[in-house]
């Protein structure tokens, strides 16, 4: 059985995010010219990191069950983590937690404990600001991810397989990324193949699509290509997605069109998750 | 009566990361008095923050003043939740600790009272237990498992039990799931209280016609029980027979 390895500090896994920072990311998102794709991307990556950190917070500490890499691709292809984590390919999650670029105050409506809600100011961590510059060297970014994943696998041959999440508007300018994606998905630990998920941020106003099992409803060739590049969700993640109320099938892929897959983190089992916390 | 306690943190973690908790009274065992033996065990959820202090508060509170009904648990948890908040928020927290604390801490609770009659030679008595979550009580008599509470089968363990939260708004789903049980004991009986990983192992073995209690009782007979327990846990984990989780075993032979 694959994807059974426990994700723990003794047996960590890694997440590699590939973020499209090309010039076309200044275009409007989902048919709205006032919302740029680059802004949406920054929101997604910041939320993904925030969610991962909180899920692994045990108190004053964050458990390093995950190591994180972020590769930006646009004018250049390089590690995009700033601060003390800057320049490193993979960083323990606790380092990410303690080093956001800044904390912004945001007002959030929270439960007041008496059946109502109140406005509360919370500190929201920002690691990434929107960047949009240059071409879309997606093939190069995937090759870089492949290299980092191979290094990780040689040191963690029995661990939960690395997860690569590519967030893009889909238009690679350095060739067809399909074969490289296929190569990444063929890499494996003894617990299963590397998972490659894609989030397609499109200018089209087509509605959001999450975890589809075929490319029938997808709006364009870029979306179809990214769907093809994406891994089928492992059974355990599929079960969790189903429990979480998502409409998924056994052939659903880790692909989102104009939608956020922050929920994908929730599909990974990393310990006892209280039933009444969902 | 012999009382033994064994515990070990997850693989690759520090002893200070151990987030199960247990407590009992009287400390020198029931033979010294007619007071009941009160024991509690709790498993702080690994996916919630500050669950270790929450688990400790729950077991200490139970041992001090055992709760026997849903209403008891409800009113006690309300008070404990306030203590937990004071204990966490006495200093500024980093952003992630603050966010995680707002979600609340979560833990199981299994509380057991073993009553003795007041006669000079105590040979029997009653016991009662209350449970929230998947920490388990097993009673063994004459080489037979006669009680398994609150879970009966290894398949009953899941990854997301409903747990007691320090965030009282999360407890509405809990009250229907508080289970109570009482029965009797007699001299020679053995009780085990364990958190989920060992409880799952115990029931799984029993379903295969094994006598898992012999393994648990064997630790006491070893020259170095603690070391013997730790070595056994590590071996079972490496063989994937035992989930890699904090483990706690309290063993009471009457």
Image (cartoon, coloured by chain):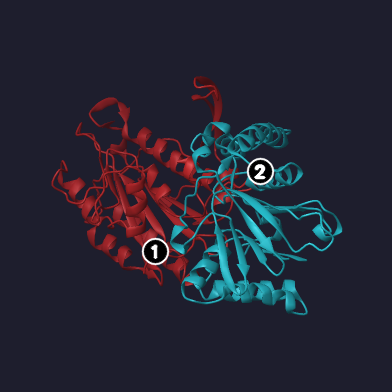
Chain colours: A red, B cyan
Whether residue B229 can be seen here? yes
Q: Residue A216 location in percent, x, y?
A: 13, 47
CA gap between label 2 and label 1 equals: 32 Å
Chain ID of residue with mark 1: A
Whether residue B110 can be seen here? no
The quarter of the image holding the C terminus of chain B is bottom right
Q: Nearer the viewer, residue B123 or B244?
A: B123
SS at mark 2?
helix
The dot on residue B54 is: 2
Q: How many marks are shown on the rendered structure?
A: 2
Chain ID of residue with mark 2: B
The residue furthest front is B119
The quarter of the image holding the N terminus of chain B is bottom right
Using the image, determine if residue B48 lies above or below residue B207.
above
Using the image, determine if residue B153 lies above or below residue A72.
below
Name the residue located 83 percent from the left edge and 60 percent from the top edge: B31
Q: Residue A96 location in percent, x, y?
A: 55, 47
Using the image, determine if residue A58 lies above or below residue B217.
above
Q: Residue B93 location in percent, x, y?
A: 66, 36
Q: Are marks 2 and 1 on the same chain?
A: no
SS at mark 1?
loop
Q: Nearer the viewer, residue B134 or B99?
A: B134
The residue furthest left is A216
Corner quadrant of residue A180:
bottom left
Name the residue located 86 percent from the left edge and 58 percent from the top edge: B32
Q: Nearer the viewer, residue A276 or A166?
A: A276
Task: Select label 2 or label 1 by which is in front.
Answer: 2
Name the residue located 34 percent from the left edge and 53 percent from the top edge: A239
Label 1 Cα neighbours within 10 Å, binned few <14 / some 14-19 / many ≥20: many
Residue underneath mark 1: A3
Name the residue located 28 percent from the left edge and 58 percent from the top edge: A231
Q: Residue A150 location in percent, x, y?
A: 41, 67
């Amino acid at each position: 059985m694959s994807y059974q390895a426990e994700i723990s500090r003794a047996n960590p896994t890694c997440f590699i995010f590939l973020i499209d920072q090309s010039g076309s990311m200044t275009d409007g998102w989902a048919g709205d010219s006032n919302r740029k794709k680059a802004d949406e991307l920054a929101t997604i990556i910041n939320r993904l990191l925030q969610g991962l950190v909180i899920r692994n917070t045990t108190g004053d500490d964050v458990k390093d069950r995950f190591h994180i890499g972020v590769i930006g691709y646009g004018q250049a292809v390089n590690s995009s983590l700033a601060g003390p984590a800057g320049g490193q390919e993979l960083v323990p999650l606790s380092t990410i937690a303690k080093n956001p670029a800044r904390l912004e105050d945001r007002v959030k409506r929270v439960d007041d404990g008496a059946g109502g809600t109140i406005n509360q100011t919370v500190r929201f961590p920002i690691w990434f600001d929107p960047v949009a510059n240059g071409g879309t060297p997606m093939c190069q970014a995937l090759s870089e991810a492949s290299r980092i994943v191979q290094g990780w696998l040689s040191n963690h041959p029995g661990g939960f397989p690395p997860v690569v999440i590519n967030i893009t508007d889909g238009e690679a300018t350095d060739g067809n990324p399909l074969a490289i994606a296929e190569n990444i998905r063929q890499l494996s630990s003894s617990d299963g193949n590397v998972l490659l998920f894609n989030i397609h941020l499109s200018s089209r106003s087509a509605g959001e699509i999450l975890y589809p099992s075929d490319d029938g409803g997808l709006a364009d060739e870029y979306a179809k290509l990214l769907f093809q590049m994406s891994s089928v969700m492992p059974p355990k993640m599929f079960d969790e997605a189903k429990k979480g109320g998502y409409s998924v099938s056994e052939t659903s892929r880790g692909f989102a069109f104009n939608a956020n897959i922050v929920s994908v983190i929730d599909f990974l089992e990393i310990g006892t998750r209280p039933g009444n916390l969902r | 009566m012999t009382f033994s306690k064994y515990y070990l943190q997850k693989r690759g973690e520090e002893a200070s990361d151990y987030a199960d908790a247990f407590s009992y009274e009287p400390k020198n065992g029931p033979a010294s008095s007619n007071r009941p033996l009160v024991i509690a065990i709790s498993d702080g959820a690994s996916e919630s923050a500050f669950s270790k202090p929450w688990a400790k508060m729950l077991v200490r509170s139970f041992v001090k003043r055992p709760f026997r009904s849903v209403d008891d648990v409800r009113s006690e948890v309300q008070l404990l939740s306030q203590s937990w908040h004071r204990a966490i928020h006495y200093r500024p927290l980093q952003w992630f600790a603050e966010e995680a604390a707002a979600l609340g801490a979560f833990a199981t609770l299994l509380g057991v009272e073993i009553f003795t009659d007041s006669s000079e030679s105590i040979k029997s008595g009653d016991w009662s237990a209350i449970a929230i979550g998947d920490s388990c009580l097993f009673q063994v008599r004459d080489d037979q498992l006669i009680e398994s509470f609150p879970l009966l089968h290894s398949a009953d363990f899941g990854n997301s039990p409903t747990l007691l939260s320090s965030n009282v708004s999360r407890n509405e789903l809990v009250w229907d799931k508080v289970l109570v049980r009482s029965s009797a004991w007699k001299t020679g009986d053995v009780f085990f209280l364990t958190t989920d990983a060992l409880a799952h192992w115990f029931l799984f073995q029993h379903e295969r016609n094994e006598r898992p209690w012999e393994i648990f009782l064997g630790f006491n007979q070893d020259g170095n029980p603690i070391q013997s327990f730790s070595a056994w846990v590590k071996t079972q984990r490496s063989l994937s027979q035992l989930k890699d989780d904090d483990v706690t075993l309290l063993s009471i032979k009457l």
